[in-house]
Image (cartoon, helix red, strand yellow):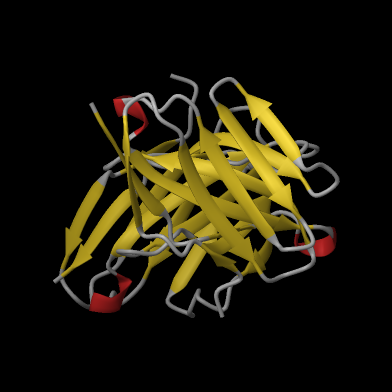
Amino acid sequence: DTGVSQDPRHKITKRGQNVTFRCDPISEHNRLYWYRQTLGQGPEFLTYFQNEAQLEKSRLLSDRFSAERPKGSFSTLEIQRTEQGDSAMYLCASSLTGTVHNEQFFGPGTRLTVL
Amino acid sequence: DQQVKQNSPSLSVQEGRISILNCDYTNSMFDYFLWYKKYPAEGPTFLISISSIKDKNEDGRFTVFLNKSAKHLSLHIVPSQPGDSAVYFCAASARGGSNYKLTFGKGTLLTVNP
């Protein structure tokens, strides 16, 4: 399978705990994105990497959130001191520079439930 | 503020008929428009896209129409099939410095009845 993969698919945690999600993009894609989707909403942009450089963070991403892409391949998204409002589907997507219409390819997502 | 709007939360269509999903946008900087399909427990799947310099793009049963002056686009599915039942998201991408991120609408749930 050469698509975008995410791990874990589901995570249940207690408020105040830290969680980390992993994303493996399509191998030749140099761009990687994180989005968050809550019930009844479309995906909302969180952050973007070109290779290993994090080029933008949305204002939605509070100081408790951090993302890395250390070698320009896989990425991790960490949430510290989780809150109930962090419960959502976290989606990772990847793309290749120069794609005509900026088509991004999404993984299956990690569903986070904060109790 | 919702820059991409899908005002119909749901649409029900009979198999074999046409499905028309609508999308409006407010940001005149948007240059590319994309449609994604999402099944439950899966990530969005890219369906079709269009550039603002065109008014129509067709791929098999799927056609996207863009009316730039009205800031409106629509996705036509002909003929509709039960396997098309999913949530459809309209997304847009701006030119220039922010051309890497997609702005999504809230989605329209399409149900195609056999």
Task: Say which quarter of the image contains residue A38.
Answer: bottom left
Task: Say which quarter of the image contains residue A81.
Answer: bottom left
Could you tell me which quadrant the N terminus of chain B lies in? bottom right
Horizontal and vertical percent for residue A114?
20, 69
Q: Is residue A1 left or right of residue B63?
A: left
Pick the front one: B107 or B70: B70
- Vertical position of residue B62 compared to residue A33: above or below: above
Residue A69 visible: no
Q: Residue at x 13, y 71 (%)?
A: A115
Give the mark count. 0
Q: Residue at x 27, y 67 (%)?
A: A87
Horizontal and vertical percent for residue A42?
44, 60
- Vertical position of residue B70 compared to residue B47: above or below: below
Residue A26 visible: yes
Q: Is residue A23 left or right of residue A28?
A: left
- Vertical position of residue B1 compared to residue A70: above or below: below
Q: Residue at x 71, y 54 (%)?
A: B100
Horizontal and vertical percent for residue B58?
67, 28
Q: Is residue A110 left or right of residue A45?
A: left
Could you tell me which quadrant the C terminus of chain B lies in? top left
Horizontal and vertical percent for residue A93?
53, 44
Pick the front one: A27 or A52: A27
Q: Residue at x 77, y 43 (%)?
A: B55
